Structures are given as structure tokens and as C-alpha cells.
Image: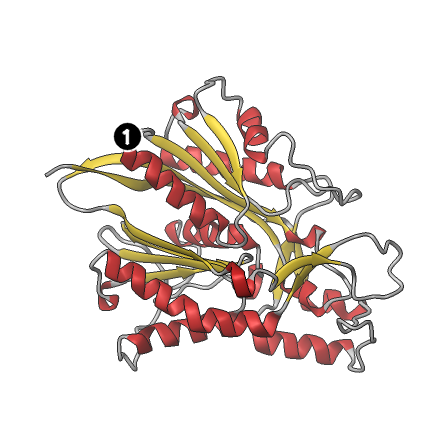
Amino acid sequence: MNNIYSIITGTGSYIPTRQIKNDFFLSNEFYESDGRKLDKSNQEVIDKFLEITAIEERRYVTNELVTSDIAYFAALEAIKSAKIDQEELDYIIVAHNFGDVKFDNKQLDIVPSLAARVKHSLGIKNPNAVAYDIPFGCPGWLQAVIQADYYIKSGDAKKILVIGADTLSRISDPHDRDCMLYADGAGAVILEAKISETAIGILAHKTRSDTLEYSKMLLMDKSYNPDFHNPDERFLKMNGRRLYQYALEIVPQAIKDCLDKSNTQLEDVNKILIHQANGKMDDAILKRLYKLYNIDKMPENVMPMTISWLGNSSVATIPTLLDLVKNGKIASHEIKNGDILVFASVGAGMNINAMVYKN
């Protein structure tokens, strides 16, 4: 029996040119959340940060660029990779969290939507190419892919552009140690409808939102520096310890639920592409996932990582990771025809999602 499946036919990414190593933060003044100045040297803070996160550097956009610009750059690469006519796109969905935040003006700018701006930059004339945004925390890009899958399987769409882009460097508090986590970037894919007798492309997905207890683990709040020059300015804040515990408790089971939904065994999975938020946390999530299957020895090279040199670029991490692996830019990793991939993310909301994909 023939069914409609959503397949990824093109990928693209934009990696900003500003390379920010950890010693960039040696001159920062760091404070505790209660306004007390840290009693440790910045070198101690940075060394501990590296030990916990595995982040050695990250990328920032140059001053003249905003999120919709880099979303457009990634979109161009994805369209070129898929070899499609962009006028045939049915939807353009952009996942982001903070809109176009300018270097010299932190005011939120989301009118028109970033998707509308990308469509304009692409020069698409087709009014039936519907452009809209989705804010869903770090899992936003994957959730946009899930929405696209619904459109395709319903018969409503044949070609969809899905982009994840953020400039977290613009909304991070320079007086909060967590600012070292955040990075900028953009990634994109083209999803197309394919009729097939055998299951291919997106096999299953699963999403959950734990808002009752965990909605404020990521939020916008004032600077930790009590003497910050603009007391009304708000920055991204995170309850890192609780978020770490939450992710370890919930993400592995969410992935297992998605694998079960697709009737896929973990042993058959070739690659796990997980949101790059914290290297230590991702390793722990992976170990707990395999423990759910009573597997003590994990396979080598199952989880490609970019966090050591790209940091946490929120919605851009997974599509960027996919593009780099697809193009042979991460050593010892490749994706072959027939491979089973698992995508998973966790972030503000708190939201978690997972997807099983057959290449």
C-alpha cells in the first residue's frame, strides 16, 4: 500500500564568522543571582564551565546581521541542496525565540514575521507559499518539522522550508556565567512529499510540554549586576541545575516513547542528533536512554557533537548538526541510505520532542 511520507531533500546552515573562545570572557564581571559578585577568578569560572559543558568556543554574528538575515542564508543553502524551484514551496516556517534583535537595539522585532522576511529576501512571488514563525524554545525547529509533516501527510503540502535561527548573544547577560553557553546560528531543511510502499522519511514523532511545574526554568529577567546601566533591560535566565535534572529524567523516556511509536528498536538506530545544550548533559541523556533498554555498552559514534566549537545556538543546533554531518564536515560521522536517525530536543516551556527518521 502506498503512503505519503515526509523526506528531507536538502539541508543548509549558516555558521557565523565571529569565533569566540572562552578567554573572551576573562574580562567579564560575573555576579550571583542575588547580586553578589562572584568570589572566584574568571579563569576558575571558565575552567569549571569547560569541564561541565565541553564548550571551548562559540560563534557570534557580526554587528550588521540579525536573525532573519542568517535564516535567509541557511534557506538559500537548503534550497540549493534540494535543487527545487523556491516558487513551489507551500510553507516557510521559521523557528526562533527572540526575533530580530539588533546589535544596538534590544527591542523585540517580530513584525512582520521572520518567515515573511525570509520569503521576501528569497524573492518568492507565490502568495500561496504561507510564511509563519514558531516560538517553542530550543525544540522549536524540530516542532516546526513535526508541523510540516502533518501538512504533508494530510495532502495539504508537497514542499516545505523549515528554518531554525537565533542570535542568543544579543539576549545573554554578560554578568551571568550562563552567557558562555549561548551562541548564534541558523540551519534549514527542505521537506518534500514522497509516495512509497515502504516506510521512509519521518516515521514517528512525540512532543510533550511540562508547563505546570517547569514553565519558569527558562525566562527573561534583569541582569545579575545590581548596578547594570539599564535596570529595565531583560536577559535570558536559566535554572541550570533543575533543567539538567529534568532533562535527565524526561528526555530518555520521551525518545523511547517515540521509538516505540515507530516500532523501532534502539539497536537499529544509526545516529542520534540531540540538541547541543551541554556536552555533559547530552552524554548523560544518552547513557540513560541505553539503560532503559538494558544496554550497558553504547555503540561508538552514534551521537555527533558540535557543542565544543559551536556552543548552544538553540533552534539552530540540530539542523546545523544535520547539515554538517550530511556534508561530511564532522569527522567519523556520515549518514547513509537506509540509516535510522533519532532527533530530540529539550528547552523552554519546558518542551521536549523527538522524531524517528529513515534516510
Secondary structure found at label 1: loop
Res 298 visible: no
Question: Where is residue 221 shown, x and y percent of the image?
Answer: 73, 58
Residue at 57%, 73% in the rendered image: 242
Q: Quadrant of the N terminus?
A: top left
Question: Where is residue 215 shown, x and y percent of the image?
Answer: 57, 60
Quarter of the view holding residue 146: top left
Question: Where is residue 190 shown, x and y percent of the image?
Answer: 39, 37
Name the residue nearer the viewer: 76 or 179.
Answer: 179
Name the residue nearer the viewer: 309 or 225.
Answer: 225
Residue at 76%, 45% in the rendered image: 106
Q: Describe residue 213's horizontal placement relative to residue 326 as left or right.
A: right
Question: Where is residue 290 shown, x and y percent of the image?
Answer: 32, 74
Q: How many marks?
A: 1
Question: Which residue is situated farthest in the front direction here?
Answer: 212
Quarter of the view holding residue 236: bottom right
Question: Which residue is situated farthest in the left direction here?
Answer: 1
Residue at 57%, 62% in the rendered image: 309
Q: Describe residue 85's horizontal placement relative to residue 57 as left or right.
A: left
In the depicted structure, whether residue 155 falls above or below residue 313: above
In the depicted structure, whether residue 291 falls above or below residue 320: below
- Quickly name the residue at label 1: 155
Name the residue nearer the viewer: 23 or 7.
Answer: 7
The amino acid marked with disc number 1 is: Gly
Mark 1 packing: few (<14 Cα in 10 Å), some, or many (20+)?
Answer: few
